[in-house]
Structure formats: C-alpha cells, structure tokens
Image (spheres, grey):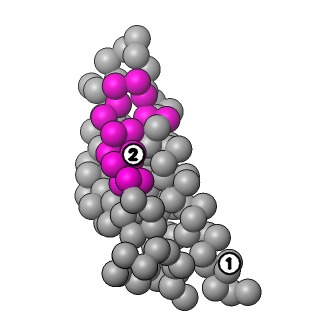
Amino acid sequence: MFLLRPLYLTMPINEELAIPTVERFLALVTALDAIWDPGTSYLDDPRYSELRREIDGSISRVKTIADECEPGLSDRITKGLQGTFGYSGAVSAVTQLLGQLRRAEQHRRN
C-alpha cells in the first residue's frame, strides 16, 4: 500500500489516495497546456483563470507527493507551471510522478 522510495524520505504515501489527486492535477495542467498560445492573450481567457485557481488549490499537495517520490521532481513541476514556454514541462513532470505512483501500486499488488 505504500510507495517504495529512498530511505531518507519519511512520509509514507498511500497510492490509492495519491493517484486520483495526481490524475486530477495532470488533467488540469494538460488543459492549461492546451489553451496556451504564445500569439494570443490566453491570460484573459476565463478558462485560464479557472484552471490556475484549481491548480493553485492543489499544487502544495501534489508537490508534497512529488517530493516524497523523487528529489527535484516538485521543482520541475513548479518550473513547468511558470508558463514561459508553455506548460509541457509541467505535463511531463506530473506524468512522470503519476507513472511512479502507478508502478509502486502495481508492485505492491504483486
């Protein structure tokens, strides 16, 4: 039931709770990446504001999960959410996190 991770990490992660949280976050970040367009003012798009509000409401939980899975992964998520060159970096980092959680859950079940 708990993620296999390096010994220096102290908080056990319950994948059954973490996976849905990270899946939802990935859906939000992917939607944000989909509306990003460097040639337009996507910042004025009400969808952008709504997505950012939801992302901002759950980022600390996701970063905590990421920190417990892999050092530096939460920093990649944060950097990817800056939106300077789109949000694909955040999508990639969150996808990696979700993959790690799913592998840990599968390992636990076997």
Q: Is residue 80 magenta?
A: yes
Q: Which residue is mark 1?
A: 106
* For residue 97, above or below residue 39: below
State the residue at coordinates (54%, 78%).
4
45 sits to left or right of 19:
left
Q: Report the front residue among 55 and 84.
A: 84
Measured as percent of width and height from the top left, residue 55 is found at: 32, 51
The residue tagged with tag 2: helix, strand or loop?
A: helix
Where residue 97 appears, as percent x and y from the top left, is 51, 59
- Rendered view: 78 above or below 25: above
Q: Position of residue 37 (x, y in %)?
A: 43, 20
| Dot 2 amino acid type | Arg
Closer to the camera in the image, 90 or 43? 90
Task: Classify 43 as above or below 48.
Answer: above
Task: Tell me if 100 is positioned left or right of 31 in this view.
Answer: right
Q: Quick one: label 2, few (<14), some, or many (20+) residues within 10 Å? A: some
Quadrant of the rendering where the N terminus is positioned? bottom right
Answer whether residue 53 is magenta in the image.
no
Which of pointers 1 and 2 lies earlier in the amino acid sequence? 2
Q: Quadrant of the C terminus?
A: bottom right
Q: What span is colored magenta in the figure?
A: 72-88
Label 1 secondary element? helix
Q: In this rendering, does residue 62 appear at all?
A: no
Residue 90: x and y in percent read 44, 43
Rendered image quadrant of residue 12 = bottom left
The residue located at (40%, 24%) in the rendering is 85
Residue identified by numbered label 2: 76
| Cα distance between the residues tagged 1 and 2 | 25 Å
